[in-house]
Amino acid sequence: MSVTLHTTHGDLKVEIFCETVPETAENFLALCACGAYNDTPFHRFMPGFMIQGGDISLSRAATAADGHPPILPFDDIPKGGTSIYHPSALNQEIRTPALRHTSRGMLSMASRPVKDRTAPGMQNAAGPTVNGSQFFITFVPAPHLDGESTLFGRVLNLTAQDENGDVLGRLENSKAKVDKKGRVIQPKEGEEIEGEWEALKLVSVTIHANPFAK
């Protein structure tokens, strides 16, 4: 199945590996479906390596506002985001050698270390790291991540001839400002200048088919 990630630099068509990594896929698709990823920044950007986003704690749609209830079944979203299984952990689903970071455009979860197995989002953790809501997309093959990160999808439009063109290339070549650690400095309203200082955001997501929908 596939989704389209509508970004500030065009639409990324992405295949999701639902059968191979079902819990990770369900988490990602559920967060897409409820709008938790809408208007969230790509907050880490390293040309020649990867771009990272998915921090739902930065999403206005993920928290209660204007008297409306939150769209997620909990309102204590920790800094950095969390999974739909919160307060339980979303454990790694490493599937090597079947799924490996062998090419550009691989979609993987950005994990975080388990420091307290009683903390929300860490409960029932099976290993030293767990996943939440954050993900990254590789700009190049990254074999050093095999066995470390849960790979759950791949970008389908990677050339100028593909539908929507090479949007990943546009993102990699964007005029974003980053600090020494690769953290994106997003322009505030009125500060963005095309070709000089550009925002990097995931605007919204279209799900083309969701096998987990009930």
Image (cartoon, rainbow, N blue to C red):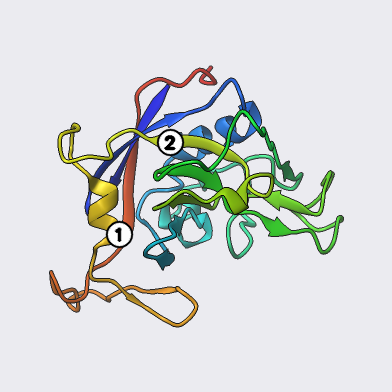
Where residue 2 appears, as percent x and y from the top left, is 39, 26
Query: On the picture, is 165 further left or further right than 104?
Result: left
Amino acid at pointer 1 = Glu
Q: Nearer the viewer, residue 29 or 161?
A: 161
Amino acid at pointer 2 = Arg
Give the secondary structure at mark 1. Answer: helix
Where residue 47 appears, as percent x and y from the top left, is 36, 64
Where residue 195 appears, as percent x and y from the top left, is 13, 71
Could you give the CA–CA distance between mark 1 and mark 2, rounded to whole angstroms? 16 Å
Q: Which residue is mark 1?
A: 172
Q: Which residue is mark 2?
A: 154
| Mark toward the start of the polypeptide (1 vs 2) | 2
Where residue 61 appears, as percent x and y from the top left, is 42, 51
Query: On the picture, is 212 further left or further right than 60?
Result: right
Query: On the picture, is 31 further left or further right than 5?
Result: right
Query: On the picture, is 98 further left or further right than 165?
Result: right
Q: Nearer the viewer, residue 187 or 107?
A: 107
Which residue occupies 35% across, 54% down?
Answer: 39
For residue 158, which quarter of the picture?
A: top left
Could you tell me if residue 85 is visible in this image? yes
Give the secondary structure at mark 2. Answer: strand
